[in-house]
Amino acid sequence: MPRVQIIEMSLRDGLQNEVTHLSVGQRFSLIKKLNDAGIRRMEIGAFVSPTWVPQMSESGKLIKKVLRAQKMRRLHKETHFSALVPNRKGLETALESGIKEIAVFGAASETFSQRNINCSISQSLKKFEEVIKEARANKIKVRGYLSTVFGCPYEGAVSQAKVIKLVEKYLAMGVYEISLGDTIGVATPKQVREILNKVLKMSNSSKIAMHFHDTRGTAIANILASLDLGIRKFDTSLGGLGGCPYAPGAAGNVATEDVVYMLHGMGYTTGLDLQKLIKTTQWMSRQVGRQLPSKLSLTGG
């Protein structure tokens, strides 16, 4: 049966917009539960200023704890952990932590780029080029995020031609994979097919992942459209946890368990235990003090 890879976003993209700030211990417990449910790729922190994103404070401490646990076989040895790195200063801290994969995060919208990372798109590309070069020199893999691919909270529609040029630039800089993000959840399957048909003319599908937020309830439909075009990697977030502090009103990433339910029902394999994911979502709801929006956490499966 065809296999689909889930990249878990709850610990970074999920928690960064939560009012409740989880301790290193709570975040580590979440990692263990996700790992036990079969998750083998997860982004677990960000080397950003705690003044701007306090939810990501002590990411270095968490990563060191996780890597020690993995070495002691308390976490699966084949699990890949990553962290977001915005600039060279963040990379220096990331290298100290021992992490073996990082991600850079840019936008297809000038206004969103300015609001989110305080620089223009061209400036961000220069920063990323430096980070990627240094990371690869230190044998660190680099993933790329391109946000606002389908729409911007400030500018509205985003040019597909602009998106394609940026994807090309990211790949040329040396990211091993690029995640195309619907940051505010405006995409429709028609848009997804249009973008992917163009992207896949210049890149193998193995280098492309999709990142859908479920603000308007179209994320699952957009995943289905992506599957039809051969995409087999998706960013999801346990329970639908998350949002974006620079995109008011945006919902969290599509819920991991809802996506897994659909995939399993369609005959795809993921290596994930659906019931354990649901139980972890219920546990997570207690940690953040609110009911998370995933459908399966309410139905129980």
Image (cartoon, rainbow, N blue to C red):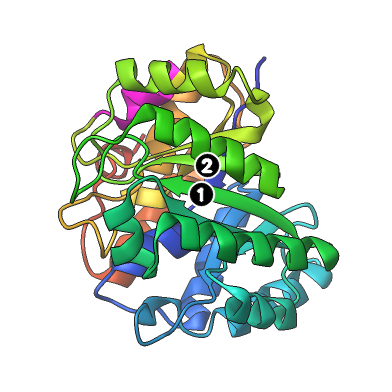
Q: Which quadrant holds the N terminus?
A: top right
Q: Which quadrant holds the C terminus?
A: top left
Magenta-colored span: 218-225
The answer to whether residue 120 is seen in the rendering is yes
Mark 1–mark 2 Cα distance, whole angstroms, equals 5 Å
| Amino acid identity at mark 1 | Tyr
| Amino acid identity at mark 2 | Ser
Q: Position of residue 117 (x, y in %)?
A: 39, 67
Q: In the displayed structure, does residue 144 sit left or right of residue 99?
A: left
Residue with the mark numbered 2 = 179
User: Contact, CB < 8 Å: mark 1 with mark 2?
Assistant: yes
| 220 in magenta | yes
Q: Position of residue 131 (x, y in %)?
A: 66, 66
The answer to whether residue 36 is seen in the rendering is no
Q: Secondary structure at mark 1?
A: strand
Label 1: how many residues lie within 10 Å, few (<14), some (14-19) or many (20+)? many
Q: Position of residue 168 (x, y in %)?
A: 59, 36
Residue 236 quadrant: top left
Taking 244 as reference, is 266 above or below it? above
Residue with the mark numbered 1 = 145
- Residue farthest left in this picture: 249
Residue in the foreground of this view, choosing between 197 and 26: 197
- Residue farthest front in this picture: 122
**Which numbered disc covers residue 173?**
none
Q: Name the residue: 46% across, 83% down.
A: 57
Q: Name the residue: 76% across, 75% down.
A: 98
- Our reading of the magenta stretch's main secondary structure is helix
